[in-house]
Image (tube, grey):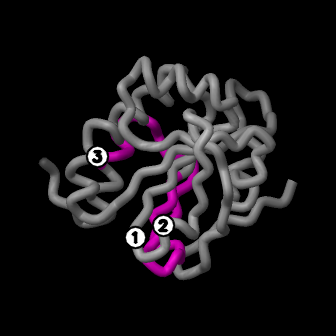
Amino acid sequence: MLMTHLTSGTPAPDFSLYDAENKLHTLSQFKGQKVILYFYPKASTPGCTTQACDFRDNIASLASHGYQILGISPDAPAALEKFRTENDLNFPLLSDEDHSVAEAYGAWGEKKNYGKTYVGLIRSTFVIDENSDIELAQYNVRAKGHVSKLRKDLAIDPR
C-alpha cells in the first residue's frame, strides 16, 4: 500500500466532516487561523483518552497562541459524543468513518502490532498555518507526552 506523507509547506487537504453533535466542519472555515489536527485510532481506548485529555488540559494555552484543536477518528458520531461527554472534551471530534480524510493526510496505512501487520489509522498530528498549509506533520506519534512534545516543537513555553 502506497502512502503519501504530507510535508511542511504543502497545502493541507480540505475536508468536510461531522462532529459528535452532527455539526459540519471544514478546514476552509478555519482559514486565517492556526489548526492542530490530530488523528487518533479509536474513541474511549486508553491511549486515545490520554491524548484527548492532554489536549483538553492544554487547550487554553494552545488557544492563547492562536491554535484551534480538531480531533479526527474513524468512529461514528455517537461514539464520539460518548467519548466527548465522558471526558469533558472541549474541542470538536470529527467522524471520518470511511477514512478518506485520514488517507488524504497519509494517516491511514499499514501498521504493526505484536508482529501482525494490518491496515488502520496511524496516530498522526498536523499543524496547519493561517494559509491552510502544513506547518508541521508528525506520524506515528505516541499518545502519552505528545502534547508536551508538540508544545516544544511549536516553541510554546510549558505552563
On residue 33, which mark appears?
Answer: 1
- Total tally of numbered discs in the picture: 3
Quarter of the image where one finds residue 113: top right
Q: Position of residue 147 (x, y in %)?
A: 34, 46
Residue 133 relative to residue 110: left or right: left
Question: Residue shown at 35%/55% (left/top)?
Answer: 150
Q: Position of residue 102 (x, y in %)?
A: 69, 51
Give, as a three-letter code, the residue at label 3: Ile
Determine whether label 3 and label 2 are within 8 Å by CB.
no
Magenta segment, which residues? 125-148
Q: Position of residue 13 (x, y in %)?
A: 66, 68
Q: Is residue 158 shown above or below 51?
A: below
Q: CA distance from mark 3 to mark 1?
A: 15 Å
Looking at the rendered image, the disc whose residue lies closer to the viewer, 3 or 2, is: 2
Residue 111 relative to residue 33: left or right: right
Question: Residue shown at 44%/57% (left/top)?
Answer: 36
- Compare marks 3 and 2 and give the one earlier in the sequence: 2
Q: Which residue is mark 3?
A: 59
Q: Residue furthest right?
A: 1
On residue 30, which mark appears?
Answer: 2
Determine whether label 2 and label 1 are within 8 Å by CB.
yes
Give, as a three-letter code, the residue at label 2: Phe
